Amino acid sequence: MVSYGYMEEIDRWVLHRLQEIIQRVREAYNQYYFHMAFFTLYNFCTVDLSALYLDVLKDRLYTSKADSRTRRSAQSAMYIILDAMTRLLAPILTFTAEEIWLSLPLHDRREQSVHFTQFPEVNPEYMDAGLAHNWSTMIALRGEISRAIETARKNKVVGHTLDARVDISPPDNLRSFLETHREDLKTLLILSQITFVDKDEIKNPYMSQEFPGLTIGVMKARGTKCDRCWVYSESVGIAREHPTICERCLANL
């Protein structure tokens, strides 16, 4: 397990979201609002996990070194989530929750059955309002940029998002934020490249309605597609012994 302070930012964000879910579900159970408990958990699984966090996480899990801090960070967050979710779902999916519980990694403190445990408590260490605000902004930006990518896909400019390079001309109030979180945003969008350019350099611009002044352009990514991670990079081929992989994958190998 990687301690919270050494986790990647997106892993710390999802643990913040988990605490909000725990609080809401416990309140629902206490008030006998079982439908609210179910739909809160269902939406967390489909919206926060499946459509966002786990989708984004695949690159790090598949391509990082097995024992790297970044990969262990993802695994640690997923273990914490699964442990909490199994407990919260136990009254609803009794047999399935028990099967999951028995499949979790063994450790000395684990109860014999999930039905011998208590609901998880909200962990104040995992709550970070500032972090949550930043990621809410990035998720909203992800939605706007995804619309521009979808338009480019319809126009046959790109296929998969990893085929794309996104050029962004941000308004002044967003520039510093975007520059600070460039890599996080690239990860969120599952893109090969993000660049910041002047507005007049963008061909076929997409004008954001949600973020006034934000202009987005989508082009074919520069470089060659890495056979290992599928990200386009101009560093593919720099190593003679591995001519079809990028610099990042070379370091991981």
Image (cartoon, rainbow, N blue to C red):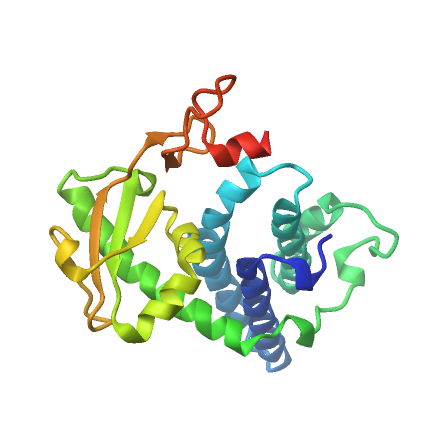
Quadrant of the drawing holding the C terminus: top right
Q: Position of residue 21 (x, y in %)?
A: 56, 70
Please tell me in which quadrant of the rendered image residue 139 appears.
Answer: bottom left
Q: Camera-side residue: 106 or 140?
A: 140
Which residue corresponds to the image point at 31% horizontal and 76% vertical from the top-left? 173
Tell me the residue at 12%/50% (across/down). 203
How many labels, in total?
0
93 and 74: which is toward the camera: 74
- Which quadrant of the structure image shows residue 47? bottom left
The answer to whether any part of residue 115 appears in the image is yes
In this rendering, does residue 87 appear at all? no
Image position, residue 209 (x, y; %): 19, 70
Q: Is residue 110 above or below residue 128?
A: above
Q: Residue at x 21, y 57 (%)?
A: 216
**Looking at the image, is 165 positioned above or below residue 237?**
below
Q: Quadrant of residue 20?
A: bottom right
Taking depth in this image into account, of 224 and 115 the one nearest to the observer is: 224
Which residue, as the protein is rendered here, is positioned at the far top? 241
User: Is 208 displayed left or right of 122 in the figure?
Assistant: left
Q: Position of residue 42 (x, y in %)?
A: 49, 61
Q: Position of residue 130 (x, y in %)?
A: 51, 76
Q: Residue at x 36, y 30 (%)?
A: 225
